[in-house]
Amino acid sequence: MFDFSVVTTWIDEGLRGIMPASGAIAIECVLIGVLLLAVYAVFALVLILAERKVCAAFQCRLGPNRVGPWGSIQTVADMVKIITKEIISIRHVDSFLHNLAPFLVIIASLLAFSCIPFAKGLQILDFNVGILFMVAASSIGIVGILLAGWSSNNKFSLIGAMRSGAQMISYELSIGLSIMTIVVLSGTMQISELVESQNDLWFIFKGHIPACIAFVVYLIAGTAETNRGPFDLPEAESELTAGYHTEYSGMHFGFYYVAEFVNMFIVAAIATTVFLGGWMPLHIPGLDAFNQAMDYIPSLVWFLAKSVVMVFVIMWFKWTFPRLRIDQLIRLEWKYLLPLNLVNLIVMVLIVALGWHF
Amino acid sequence: MSNLLLLLVVLLTAVALVCAGWGFGVWLSPRSYNPLKEETYECGVPTRGRSWMQFRAGYYLFALLFLMFDVEAVFLFPWAVIANEMGMAALYTVLFFLVVLTLGLAYAWKKGALEWK
């Protein structure tokens, strides 16, 4: 497997060779920031286009096909357009909170995004409590959404934000517990170690039944966490016009839009990292020739392929299931997913303690 | 580089992204004044009253329940890391804790706190 830390150490040593250490670190910080922004923006653009294309395919339409080949630069044109739209300031809003909210949403999304292990050594933040940090960071977004709804002084926004808050905090539990099920199996929370320890077999196969249950629960909760798919009642167009971002316009709205799509990718990436082996190729114990053949595919390709499949599944949810009512949503989480998750955790501990996993 | 420095870099990048997007938006977009444009969005009619008002208590109930279970999750994460090495002892030590919590959930369920009314 190609280790990207070779590239980063090479850049680091090169920079240290021509300038003092503090200058090298400063340049690296700027480099990381610029790269992070570029990757973030590219992901947002690609995901918005993918969503529109997938949605079109599900509805037997063509989707965007005029701007560029197969409509591929449609979203770039959309972004240019959204930047040149006026940012309207409403008279009755709490303007400080109204302007603060997009910052929180983007900070949450970018913090979680920077924890994603794209390939071996290609990861910005790698804490020893990595996966917990990732979940915690992404939940800052709830505060941003609540602030946006509250500060807008609009009843649509308020209802949307409150629904969103109730939904996101409820499903946060399922996300935490289903990831914990895998942490019991792996014995580590550091994301790079989590991926490395799937060298022999991915966790979804290693932990068989409880891991599969945790995976399904995670997918449902993750979809709910991004306010998407059948769980998009915070911004149900037919009831609430646009939910918590009704009063946002121009690029101010654009932040929510971008963050929502990148959050979808983050959920897919966590699912990939925790359950499907991250950038680790498919290895089956005993089949050495097969494992070596799999190693020839670069780790970046493995990671992106798995996350694209997960993103497709999340989009599939959205265009297949009808929207839930709020009482159904709350019942699904508190009466089904949460007890299931608690039992599943105990089963996983039993399996690990008795050594019944692969 | 240390992780905390990187964390700071990511935070600053996020702030810079919002500032840049916002700045470009303000710089490039046209501006025109219209008293109707400043009104709160409503379906064509003037809004009645403010929206900073009382709303249903159901949301708070779920926030409280969430708090209980989320703190539990934070307590359980360190246990989950070493559960692998502890073996059966991990199960015994945490089972009591989980049973008490489950009793709490069962009580809330029985009291109808999990219903959306």
Image (spheres, coloured by chain):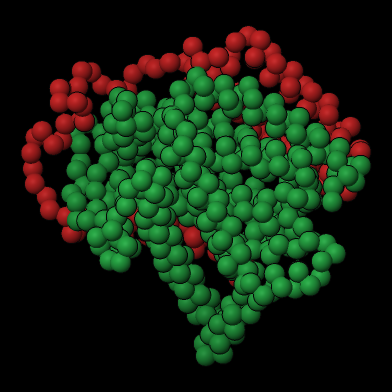
Chain colours: A green, B red
Query: Residue B30: horizontal and vertical position, in percent?
Result: 12, 53
**In the displayed image of the protein, which residue is found farthest to the front?**
A60
Query: Residue B1: horizontal and vertical position, in percent?
Result: 60, 70
Query: Residue A75: horizontal and vertical position, in percent?
Result: 31, 58
Left or right: A313 in relation to A159: right
Name which quarter of the figure residue A7 lies in.
bottom right
Tell me which residue sits at (63%, 9%) in the image: B111
Tell me which residue sits at (44%, 30%) in the image: A322
Quadrant of image for the N terminus of chain A: bottom right
Left or right: B20 in relation to A34: left
**In the displayed image of the protein, which residue is found farthest to the top?**
B111
Left or right: A217 in relation to A257: right
Above or below, A293 relative to A169:
below
**Res. B114 visible in picture:** yes
Tell me which residue sits at (64%, 63%) in the image: A279
User: Which residue is nearer to you in this view: A180 or A76?
Assistant: A76
Above or below, A330 relative to A350:
above
Query: Residue A159: horizontal and vertical position, in percent?
Result: 37, 25
Above or below, B68 relative to A273:
above
Name which quarter of the figure residue A127 lies in.
bottom right
Q: How many marks?
A: 0
Above or below, A154 relative to A229:
above
